[in-house]
Amino acid sequence: MSNREGTPKFPDSYIGDKSIEYDNSTWMERNQKKTTLLCLQYLRDDKLDNLGNYNVLDGNHYIIVDLGCGSGFSSEILVDSGHRVIGIDILIDMLSKAKTKKKNLENKKNLELILADINYLPLRKASINHIISISAYNFIIYGTETIRDKFKTVNNTAIYLKKILKPKGRIIIEFYPKDEKELEIFISSFNNNGFDGFMIKKNPAQKAGQTYLLLKKR
């Protein structure tokens, strides 16, 4: 997430002393939790209901994967909202802080934390209701050198996310593509691999920066 000190760099901004600084930031906590609440609203967006094959979500409590859960700010909100949550992160420094937060949750049994790569999730086919990702999804292309490598990574990830979602499954992503070209790579990966959806930006003229993708499984 962009902050008052500039855009964080993965993974340097999330390991060692930086992970402690991140976790202790009141500003970061407030913004991450506010964004998570907004993503929960987007999960039931009327436009998403009507996109493609019309459907409305049943019930109020779901199994939700928190992709790139970081130090657990988003997972806290999801659990407190009544969901069973599987928090996934690749960085042990961040996940250890999420584990500390879990101890203080009233419904700690509803949070499972897993150290894993978003591209290689240890989850069964059709086992998840929905997926939410806060300020992390753009990191899946970290380390890719070419456009071809980026396309391959995002497409393989989209295919796998569709596989683990149940029917009517939805994905809400808040992330920070660096430019319009990178954004298009992410959007096309979902459009070409079994998802309907659309994008939301606070400033429609904005070419990069904070972006929401609202998606549902076809």
Image (cartoon, rainbow, N blue to C red):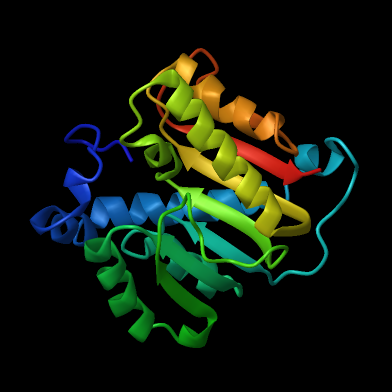
Residue 96 versus residue 35: which sits nearer the camera?
96
Q: Quadrant of the C terminus?
A: top right
Q: In the image, 61: left or right of 172?
A: right
Camera-side residue of 181 and 79: 181
Q: Position of residue 145 (x, y in %)?
A: 33, 25
Note whether 193 is above or below 92 in the view shown: above
Q: Is residue 47 visible?
A: yes
At 24% from the left and 57% from the top, the residue drawn is 26
Q: Tell me if 14 is positioned left or right of 55 in this view.
A: left
Q: Identify the residue at the far left of this view.
A: 17
Q: Nearer the viewer, residue 163 or 104?
A: 163
Give residue 95's position: percent from left, percent from top. Answer: 31, 67
Number of disc labels = 0
Lateral position of residue 108 relative to residue 16, left or right: right
Residue 214 in the figure: left or right of residue 157: right
Q: Residue at x 49, y 54 (%)?
A: 36
Instruction: Name which quarter of the figure residue 149 lies in.
Output: top left
Q: Residue at x 61, y 31 (%)?
A: 189
Above or below: residue 156 compared with residue 144:
below
> Is any part of residue 206 visible from this angle?
no
- Percent from the top left, x then y, of residue 204? 55, 17
Residue lying furthest right: 54
Query: Does 73 appear above or below 157?
Result: below
Name the quadrant of the N terminus: top left
- Residue 175: name its quadrant: top left
Q: Residue 8 placed where, x, y %?
A: 23, 38
